Image (spheres, rainbow, N blue to C red):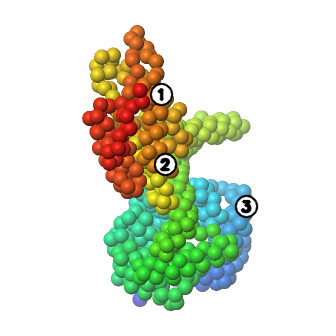
Amino acid sequence: MAESPTPAALLAEAWEQCCLDPARAAAPARALAASGDALAPWGWWHLAFAQMRRGESAAAARALAQAEQGFRAADDRRGLQLALEVQAIGLRGDGRAAEALALQQRIEADAGAARAAIDLFIAHDARAATHAALGHADDALRHHHAARDAAEASGNTGARITALAGLGGFHLVLYNLDDALEMSQCAFVAARRARSPCNLLAAASDLILIHYALGEPQAAREVSGYLVSHPEELPPAALPRARTAIALGHLAAGEIDEAVAWLERDGDAPRPEHERVAFWAWLRTRCALARGDAAGARALAEKTLAERARQGHADGAFDLMELHRALADACERLGDAAAALACVRRAQQLYEQLVGRSARARRLALQIGLDLERAKRERDVAVVSQRAVEADRQRLAELNAALERQVAENEKLHARLVEQALRDPLTGLHNRRFLFEVGPGRLEHARRQGTPLAVALLDLDHFKLLNDTYGHQAGDLALQRFAAVLRAQVRQSDIVCRHGGEEFVILMPDIGGGEAAAVLERVLDVFQQLPPALAGRRRVPSCTFSAGIATLPGDGHTLEQLLSRADRALYRAKQHGRARVEQVPGTSFATLP
């Protein structure tokens, strides 16, 4: 007959399972709580922790009261502190995130001796969730990273997987898709290997959305299919809770009937306790559009947006962006161009917000790593040097101030580097990269508004001869003077870029080919009348340029098409004697005398 596990063995098993699988952790926790041993309060605590993670708040509160009673009797400060952590988790689960944060801050203020690594993981993981619920993205990300570091230090497999899944999921919220994909994939593999149902479900659900956002429909469908075909690896009754993620996998693969079937499973309405309402709504809207029901799609999307706004719910930016995109498509199919344009604009605003979050998340993650390494080095130096307490405090204050200055400098440097990456260093104009990042959006805006847009390709005449005759310094001077004329003569709304060498591109919204040609004629007149300039000791004569113009929509629908047609017109201008402007399909505008 096998011997019953000792209280110490039961506690070790509870710690091992507490983050892997709450259901498996509850069994040794109950046995330990019923043992009457001095470790019994820890059994009650583990039972409360497992029940709280499973959403059984009432049962968790009863178990937690038993744990606190035992911890007080034993004067166990660590146990009492962890009991407060579980209480804060319960407050957040009840929608009282502000109260949860206040309690967590009180725990930090009252913390005495150094805590175990697993305790720090639980604390940081809980704080990350609380800050996320309150919309404190930077604080949440810092605590997610701290939770991962504490989990690694603890050696607890479940803690490491939970931390990785949580960090991957939050990077998804921040639209940092590359890091989210890497972390969620690692968490998914580790959760399968360690048999961690909750983490497996969370990582898989995130992966489906990440693959969809990255434009990888087949990968999203494969993860969705894995969930459906392996229910034994998931928590009990998990598939209904994952129906939106599974439906997204089918939708990504074009399997509309299957997607609708999952969305209608257990009722054709979102369940806010398990599902993001805006997420469910844009899935349902996309399905309706795929079935040709544009009117129904529009009605559902508009109703959802109105109800969420009226109730004051703060839906995720990605969900709202996708819902507005779906609504824009529905309005466009119904012929309501104004409403479609308004939705596209709102979706673009949300997209820009997400891109900003992503860049900040990556920068902050790097800074957190640097801060951690610096903090470790400074801590070691402080211990070895055995300085006086007051000197240590002064040094810490100096380090914090220096760190704040460095962070500010890093942010300024990052902003300068971004600007430099999009500027031509010689002329100060935007470069080719900027043109192809911003140009397609301007074309799409013009197309949706039904307004004209001209693309002009300009090339300095006889530039090679100028370089060969007067030297590269003279060529650089000519490029700089031409850039100055362009900045002075075109509108602020026009995009002027150095395309490469002596070629320049101007995107001119809201004007047609004739108006664009008139602008370029004026530029040509001003440029060729510039007085000679000195390059070194040599007088460099004024230059001319040739230009070709293409317009949207008559000459093309993409930036590449318009540039190609403008290039043909530029070639004709060169053939016809240079110092002139040509339009597609060939109308010429001779140079001014």
Above or below for 173 versus 267: above
**Amino acid identity at mark 2:** Ile
**Label 2 or label 1, whichever comes before in sequence order:** 2
Q: CA distance from mark 2 to mark 1?
A: 21 Å
**Quadrant the N terminus occupies:** bottom left
Residue labelled with disc 2: 511
Q: Identify which residue, 293 or 557, lies in the foreground.
A: 557
Give the residue number, with chain letter if any, for mark 3.
106
Looking at the rendered image, the quarter that the C terminus falls into is top left
- For the point 61% across and 82% down, the residue is 56
Name the spot of residue 58 as percent of width and height, x first.
66, 83
Give the residue displayed 66% in from the left and 56% down from the top: 113
Badge 2 local density, few (<14 within 10 Å), some, or many (20+)?
some
At label 1, which amino acid type do we have? Answer: Val
For label 3, the SS is helix
**Horizontal placement of 136 versus 325: left or right?**
right
Where 433 sits versus 449, above or below?
above
Q: What is the crowding at mark 3: few (fewer than 14 residues within 10 Å), some, or many (at least 20)?
A: few
Q: CA distance from mark 1 to mark 3?
A: 70 Å
The residue indicated by pointer 1 is 526
| Crowding near the residue tagged with mark 1, few <14, some 14–19, many ≥20 C-alpha atoms within 10 Å | some
Residue drawn at x 73%, y 61% is 106
> Which residue does the image show at 63% across and 40% down from the upper left?
404
Q: Is residue 251 left or right of residue 509?
A: left
Q: Is residue 556 visible?
A: yes
- Element type where label 2 sits in the image: loop
